[in-house]
Amino acid sequence: MAKEPMRVLVTGAAGQIGYALVPMIARGIMLGADQPVILHMLDIPPAAEALNGVRMELVDAAFPLLKGVVATTDVVEACTGVNVAVMVGGFPRKEGMERKDVMSKNVSIYKAQASALEAHAAPNCKVLVVANPANTNALILKEFAPSIPEKNVTCLTRLDHNRALGQISERLNVQVSDVKNAVIWGNHSSTQYPDVNHATVKTSSGEKPVRELVADDAWLNGEFITTVQQRGAAIIKARKFSSALSAASSACDHIRDWVLGTPEGTFVSMGVYSDGSYGVPAGLIYSFPVTCSGGEWKIVQGMMLLIFQFLVPCLFVHHLWLICHGQLDGVVSSASFLL
Ligand code: NAD
Ligand code: LMR
């Protein structure tokens, strides 16, 4: 029997990531090749004409799974009945900026959209925040939509996770699909800690640890980490725009694994609220290794950590959390120098 369509919201849908993301969703890359979808696309009035152009192209592409399109600048119409919300709308950083530099513009957007999602989304709506600073925007959204279960508010660090797999695959000259179980700890920012201590590569003689195959701790502890941490800036320098196709594809990976489950023996990185695991203060949005099953994520426990390599970002975010429990103005003015 054909499945009921799922409603998927993409905010900032007329932007770069939106333009790459909506055809992926309409093709079933996010929710599966047997899952019909209705796309809800939100943008702001100055982008309304461009948004209508995207809607026209979706019609022209005749996607069999696409059962409807809502293209609107009205946040309530956009949020009504959505099962999945991918929050991309906002301002990207430009060359020479850090992600924290777009904070004051983007946090106010997330406060307003939190209320609309809380009031109008479908029960149990899953939320993925992509816009930067992603962990902070997700935390704001969670704070201003208290009736959305905190486990349903996540942010995108899967792009960093995929970047780590890509770097290992290039270094070892192996297929990226044979590399798994990297972990991104912390923030989607240059303070993140990309960790390959549990990563493996499938070889003809079974799965082998990445550390054993690379056999170059100096590279793994140095250049590998900074390359992943700085990859967003490198893309901006090369393209003059921030990453879009890789961000869109990773957003699909994040939601697909969350909804449909992670493969046996595989974990992925998601920015999720902390339950206190690994000493990360409860309530923060922090990137952990997770497995997913039955539409729920679970933090992988018992991994050995090089604690000091991620303690500093953790303390920064903890400080932010404390500010957040004060008032929003405090977040905007104080957090900008913390992240
Ligand atoms: P873009 O400027 O091309 O598109 C952003 C869109 O958001 C624009 O169409 C804009 O009109 C719209 N917008 C602005 N305010 C809005 C609002 N209040 N409601 C709805 N829409 C609104 O930018 P982009 O390249 O698509 O990037 C979008 C965001 O994603 C940026 O913040 C960027 O830094 C971030 N990003 C995050 C990751 C990640 O891995 N987490 C990766 C890449 C980019
Ligand atoms: C990325 O990682 O590519 C995005 O967060 C965009 C950026 O500002 O780096």
Image (cartoon, rainbow, N blue to C red):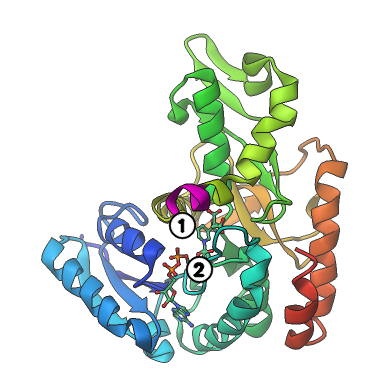
Element at label 2: strand
Name above or below for residue 21 compared with residue 108. Answer: above
Q: Where is residue 50 drawn, in percent x and y? A: 27, 77
Q: Is residue 45 visible?
A: yes
Q: Is residue 279 visible?
A: no
Element at label 1: helix
Q: In the shown orientation, is residue 275 left or right of residue 188?
A: right
Q: In the shown orientation, is residue 144 left or right of residue 308?
A: left
Q: Amino acid at mark 1?
A: Ile
Q: Residues within 10 Å of mark 1 (few under 14, many from 20)?
A: many
Q: Which residue is located at x 40 percent, y 77 percent?
A: 82
In the picture, the quarter occupied by the C terminus is: bottom right
Q: Where is residue 102 drawn, in percent x and y? A: 61, 71
Does the closest atom of ligand 1 sit within 8 Å of the Cβ of label 1?
no
Within the magenta stretch, is there residue 184? no
In magenta, the rendered stretch is 235-241
Q: Quadrant of ligand 2?
A: bottom right
Q: Amino acid at mark 2?
A: Lys
Pointer 2 or 1: first along the chain: 2
Residues at badges 2 and 1 in contact (C-beta under 8 Å)?
Answer: yes
Q: In the shown orientation, is residue 248 left or right of residue 119?
A: left
Depth check, front residue: 230 or 151: 230
Name above or below for residue 274 compared with residue 73. Answer: above
Q: Which residue is located at x 39 percent, y 73 percent?
A: 9
| Residue position for label 2 | 126
Query: Which quadrant of the structure image shows residue 305?
Result: top right
Mark 2–mark 1 Cα distance, whole angstroms, equals 8 Å
| Residue position for label 1 | 255
Depth check, front residue: 93 or 63: 93
Name above or below for residue 292 compared with residue 110. Answer: above
Q: Which residue is located at x 75 percent, y 23 percent?
A: 218
